[in-house]
Image (cartoon, helix red, strand yellow):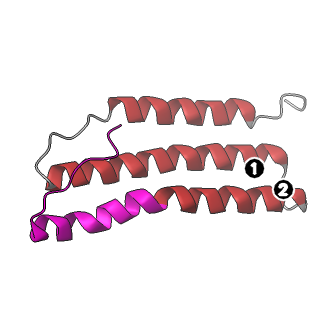
Amino acid sequence: MNTTCPVSLDPEIRRQAKPWAILGLASFPVFFLFALALFVAQAYGVVDAYTMFRCVFVAAAGRRVVSHLAVRKVQIISGETPEPWTRTLVVASLIVLFAIVLGTNWSSA
């Protein structure tokens, strides 16, 4: 994914692209804090490990989709050809599938 897409020096294009760039950059710290909160909650016994893993991996898939959406919108605003959704959706689907497999308590099934 091209995360270093150049934005035109035109002030109007920069103004339109700025919120999307901020969203793309903020998606990782928000995901990281959510995952950290889940690890702490699991350490204190608030959630079980299987639920924690499911939530963290589904959040990772969501972060991937949000980040791609932000990069795509900046590319559209700046007049570039946007990247297709194919790879992002495949990766997000594999992450969710991995979350389901990893987050299933097979010993009690």
- The reply, left or right, for residue 37 in relation to residue 9 is right
Residue at image location 81% in from the left, 62% down from the top: 41
Q: Amino acid at mark 1?
A: Met
Cα separation, mark 1 vs mark 2, equals 7 Å
Quarter of the image with the N terminus in it: top left
Residue at image location 66% in from the left, 48% down from the top: 56
Q: Which residue carries the number 1 mark? A: 52
Quarter of the image with the C terminus in it: top right
From this view, report whether residue 2 is shown above or below residue 25. above
Q: Looking at this rendering, what residue extends furthest in the front direction?
A: 9
From this view, report whether residue 91 is shown above or below residue 6. above
Q: Which residue carries the number 2 mark? A: 42
In terms of image quadrants, where is residue 101? Answer: top right
Which mark is on residue 103? Answer: none
Residue situated in front as seen by the camera: 39 or 97: 39
The secondary structure type at the circle numbered 2 is helix
Which x, y percent locates residue 69? 33, 50
Residues shaded magenta: 1-26
Which x, y percent locates residue 65? 42, 46
From this view, report whether residue 26 is shown above or below residue 58. below
Q: Is residue 37 magenta?
A: no
Q: Amino acid at mark 2?
A: Gln
Of the image marks 1 and 2, the number of the one nearer the N terminus:
2
Residue at image location 22% in from the left, 51% down from the top: 6
Q: Residues within 10 Å of mark 2 (few under 14, many from 20)?
A: some
| Secondary structure predominantly adopted by residues drawn in magenta | helix
- The reply, left or right, for residue 27 in relation to residue 82 is right
